[in-house]
């Protein structure tokens, strides 16, 4: 039986979105990894599933899976894509997403960009999580990164250039990060501007990482390197990040539908 899917991207960070609102799909981690594979599957940075919401006031329950089959608590770029999808389905310009990381209210702006309230950053070592008690603003790693959770674990290195990007895989697996981590490399270009590249946990280097941009601005603002409203330039484009006075992080950027298609799930390993 063929299953419909939608291919979307946020600044080139691309997603296969599977809809389980009308019925459960059999998605094991092996099948997810096969579907996400760039040559043997449909290919994507994350596979996203939609289910009926069970939290009050939420429009949809969203889950995010990496190409290695692991599940992530948060994905900023996919959250904007799902908000865009719900808006196009229902006309509701303020959809609310339920995720493992919490309830994420979104807003479709007049210019078509999408703002998602990504919630409060978690800055305690247990919440990132890190392997032992320590100051999350200065991790004991060469390069002195800072850590934060946006519902998923991030470490941000502040750099002059990106020559160490290839170390992202080893850093993702450093014993300091018991659940591994997304590794960001941020170059500060001004008080309200940074350039960011991210090696994503379970995915590798992507064109853009929304939660990584949120974590980078939070970590840079904690260090006094940028203001709390900051533009983040990623390989795929620009996100506006605001760490507001209510401690919530707001992320604004685009969401694009690339195409819709069908797939025979039974043709992929279970
Ligand atoms: N692309 C994402 C983050 C996806 C999840 C991440 N790889 C993880 O494992 O935490 C984003 O836009 O935030």
Image: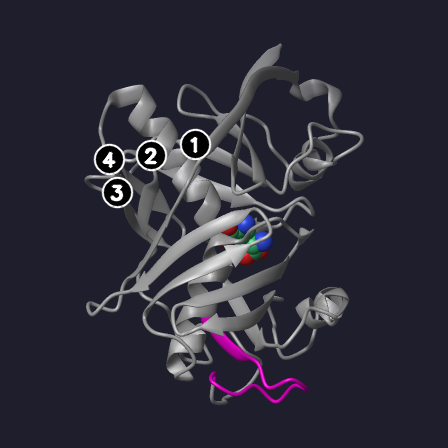
- Callout in the foreground (3, 2): 2
- According to the picture, the residue beneath numbered tag 2 turns out to be 60
- Residue nearest the observer in this picture, 70 or 261: 261
Quarter of the view holding residue 111? top left
Mark 2 to mark 1: distance in Å? 6 Å
Q: Quadrant of the N terminus?
A: top right
Question: Tags 2 and 1 in contact by the CB under 8 Å rule?
Answer: yes
Above or below residue 180? Residue 257 is above
Mark 1 to mark 3: distance in Å? 14 Å
Mark 1 CB within 8 Å of ligand 1: no
Quarter of the view holding residue 42? top right
> Along the polypeptide, which appears first: circle 3 or circle 4?
3
SS class of the residue under badge 2? strand
Above or below residue 72? Residue 131 is below
> Along the polypeptide, which appears first: circle 4 or circle 2?
2
Q: Which residue is the extreme one toward the front?
A: 190
Mark 2 CB within 8 Å of ligand 1: no
- Residue nearest the observer in this picture, 246 or 41: 246
Mark 4 to mark 1: distance in Å? 25 Å
Which residue is drawn at the image coordinates 30% and 28% (left, top)? 87
- Callout in the foreground (3, 4): 4
Q: Is residue 138 magenta?
A: yes
Left or right: 244 in relation to 29: left
Q: Residues within 10 Å of mark 3 (few under 14, many from 20)?
A: some
* Segment colored magenta: 136-148
- According to the picture, the residue beneath numbered tag 1 turns out to be 50
The picture places residue 179, in percent across and down from the top left corner, at: 59, 66
- According to the picture, the residue beneath numbered tag 3 turns out to be 55
- According to the picture, the residue beneath numbered tag 4 turns out to be 110
Mark 4 to mark 2: distance in Å? 22 Å
- Callout in the foreground (4, 2): 4
Left or right: 86 in relation to 238: left
């Amino acid at each position: 039986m063929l299953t419909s899917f939608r291919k979307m991207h946020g600044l080139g960070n691309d997603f296969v979105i599977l809809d389980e609102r009308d019925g459960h799909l059999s998605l094991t981690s092996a099948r997810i990894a096969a579907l996400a594979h760039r040559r043997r599957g449909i290919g994507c940075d994350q596979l996203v599933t939609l289910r009926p919401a069970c939290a009050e006031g939420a429009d949809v329950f969203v889950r995010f899976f990496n190409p290695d089959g692991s599940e992530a608590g948060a994905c900023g770029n996919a959250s904007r894509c799902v908000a865009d999808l719900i808006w196009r389905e229902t006309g509701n310009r303020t959809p609310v997403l339920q995720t493992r990381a919490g309830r994420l209210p979104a807003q479709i702006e007049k210019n078509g960009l999408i703002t998602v309230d990504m919630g409060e950053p978690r800055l305690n070592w247990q919440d990132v999580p890190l392997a032992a008690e320590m100051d999350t603003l200065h991790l004991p790693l060469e390069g002195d990164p800072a850590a934060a959770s946006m519902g998923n674990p991030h470490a941000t290195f502040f750099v002059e250039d990106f020559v160490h990007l290839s170390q992202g895989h080893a850093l993702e697996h450093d014993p300091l990060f018991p659940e591994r981590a997304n590794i960001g490399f941020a170059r500060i270009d001004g008080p309200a501007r940074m350039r960011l590249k991210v090696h994503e946990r379970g995915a590798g280097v992507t064109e853009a990482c929304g939660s990584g941009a949120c974590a980078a601005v939070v970590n840079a603002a904690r260090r006094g390197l940028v203001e709390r409203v900051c533009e983040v330039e990623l390989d795929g484009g620009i996100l506006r990040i605001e760490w507001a006075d209510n401690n919530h992080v707001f992320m604004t950027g685009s969401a694009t539908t690339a195409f819709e298609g069908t797939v025979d799930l039974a043709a992929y390993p279970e």
